[in-house]
Amino acid sequence: MGRATVVLIAWLCIAGVAGWRAASEPALAAGTPAAATDAAMIRHGAELAAVGDCIVCHTAKGGKPFAGGLPIDTPFGTLYSTNITPDAKTGIGSWSLEAFKRAMRRGVSSDGHLLYPAFPYVHFTHMSDEDIGAVYAFMMSRTPIQASAPANELIFPLNFRPVIAVWNLLFLHPGTPVPMSRQQDAQLDRGHYLVDTLGHCAACHSPMNLLGAEKGGKAFDGGVIDGWDAPSLKTLLHAPTPWTREQLTSYLRTGFASEHGAAAGPMLPVTRSLANASESDVEAMAAYVMSMQTSDPAPQLSTAPKANPAANAASLQAGATLFQAACASCHAAHAPMETIGGRPSLSQSTAVNSDSPRNVVRLILDGLPPEGSTPARLMPPFAGMLTDAQIADLARYLRSQYSKESPWPLTAADVAKYRKEKPAP
Amino acid sequence: MITLTVNGESHTLDIDPSTPLLYALRNQLQLHGAKYGCGLGQCGACTVIVGEEPVFSCLMPVAAIGERAVRTIEGLGTIEQPGKLQRAFINQQAAQCGYCIAGMVMRAQALLDRTPWPSDEEIRAHMEPNLCRCGTHMRILAAILEARGASNGSRS
């Protein structure tokens, strides 16, 4: 029986239970948001919303901020983020604070329908009343935009929202307070709170179970999102240059750490958002993440390939040839990008030193796209230039040349698989 | 030895396999249309078509081309008989200094080969990797709009 069949049967059982359980929530009366919220509260809410990366999912490519419509690719189909500007008809303009609080804590929309858990209410549920109030005040101070998100495209039976009630029974633990006080370090406590609630870091940096929830007991062990590896947040001391709190703070706020490299993929917009958070909050998050490092060496998932040595040497030679023409003008030791631009050597790269070759292949395929007029941190895409086999040779060469870790048993078929992993833009 | 098929003609060259395609085109084959701009794949002045894809020839290893056909601006037409897209660039006076134009034309040609009637939005998104320092972008866009429907400009 295939994995897909198991998942389908699991969902069908859940649908049955959901039908049995009265799964609807009451609509909450439309409220008029307090117009004259004070400026300090709105500013505080803006900084918190930046920690929560609200703008990242709730803004479509080229769309107005917070007006929703961004497609979110899940294993169960495509969801479109909603408009959270205070437009009364298409946004949350008619939501009372109570309704907003219920959405953040229990994933219920103002009219009573259940929200999909791509909205990370399993994390937001532990936020304090004050913080939810501040984020509400900030959202309500935005310019209302009239925009309706396209209809979701989900597989049966997930297009039937009451199913979520059962998912919530299993995975939503409202009211369980984050064990907040270590009673030793206010900064660590603050970081713990922000990482686990608003920051919802574990949502991407943890493996998922078959029902699309974070696997119990595996928080921060690393996950896969939109065709990218979200690396484990517990092995930062195993990097070629072990991460420090200062480096991590700088990375989170600028998308770049001179000892590790540039943020890419879904982490890039997160760092853009964190640039608008309060510096002390980001420092606290970095401090907390650094406090959960394991001292054991990182688990080695890959084993050395048993390819015949001659074929292996030929592959590395082919990779070296490709590197000379396609990569060396930026990534060779003498290239201006390193000598003048201060960019780290590939030997420092998180992607090159990872157990999985996914991010290296992803970066070769897609590059780092230019983003408006922000200072260039760009790399051209090679998806149309190099074949799957050539990318495999190149990635294996990078690994052998720039990392002390064991070689990747990477084949052209693996690259073909990674190529398809990215959701259509 | 490296074998390249450029604008329909096959060439066998005794060059290092890690040579970028741009150098082979300019130095060995005397095809000077594609220009060296940044050498980093960031400006697009060196754009040519390999297979069906517009590529930065300054970063394209000749060893990686294999059987794929290479098309350069010289393959689209001649001074006496410019191709349809080249004619449109002339009609719209889309070049100022002209350094980026061969790359612009080749990237646009790759789009028109795939999508004979691209929308204005599709053209803008597709042309994004190529830069023009003179600022003739509006005329370049107008030229591509004019040339729509003129696919396969090579042997017109």
Image (tube, coloured by chain):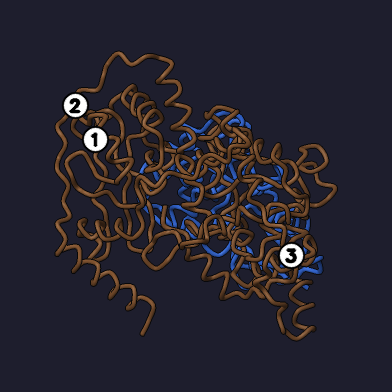
Q: Chain of mark 3?
A: A
Amino acid at circle 1: Ala
The front one of A339 and A344 is A344
The front one of A152 and B33 is A152
Q: CA distance from mark 3 to mark 2?
A: 58 Å
Position in image of residue B56 (x %, y %): 63, 52
The quarter of the picture where residue A64 lies is top left
Q: Nearer the viewer, mark 3 or mark 1?
A: 1
Taking the image as shown, residue A26 lies to the left or right of residue A254, namely left
Q: Which chain is brown?
A: A
User: What residue is shown at x 42% (from left), y 46% (from top)?
Assistant: A123
Amino acid at circle 3: Arg
Q: Colour of chain B?
A: blue
Q: CA distance from mark 1 to mark 2?
A: 9 Å
The front one of A103 and A384 is A103
Q: Nearer the viewer, mark 3 or mark 2?
A: 2
Position in image of residue A212 (x %, y %): 39, 61
- In this rendering, does residue A71 appear at all? no
Task: Look at the numbered disc 3 and give the secondary structure of its residue.
Answer: helix
Q: Which residue is mark 3?
A: A399
- Point out the tag, 1 or 2, that comes first from the N-terminus: 2
Q: Residues within 10 Å of mark 2 (few under 14, many from 20)?
A: few
Q: Chain of mark 2?
A: A
Q: Chain of mark 1?
A: A
Q: Report whether mark 3 lies on the same chain as mark 1.
A: yes
1 and 2 marks in contact (CB < 8 Å): yes
Q: Which residue is mark 1?
A: A99
Q: Which mark is residue B59?
A: none
Q: Going by the picture, which residue comes out furthest to the front?
A: A183
Q: Which residue is mark 2?
A: A31
Amino acid at circle 2: Gly
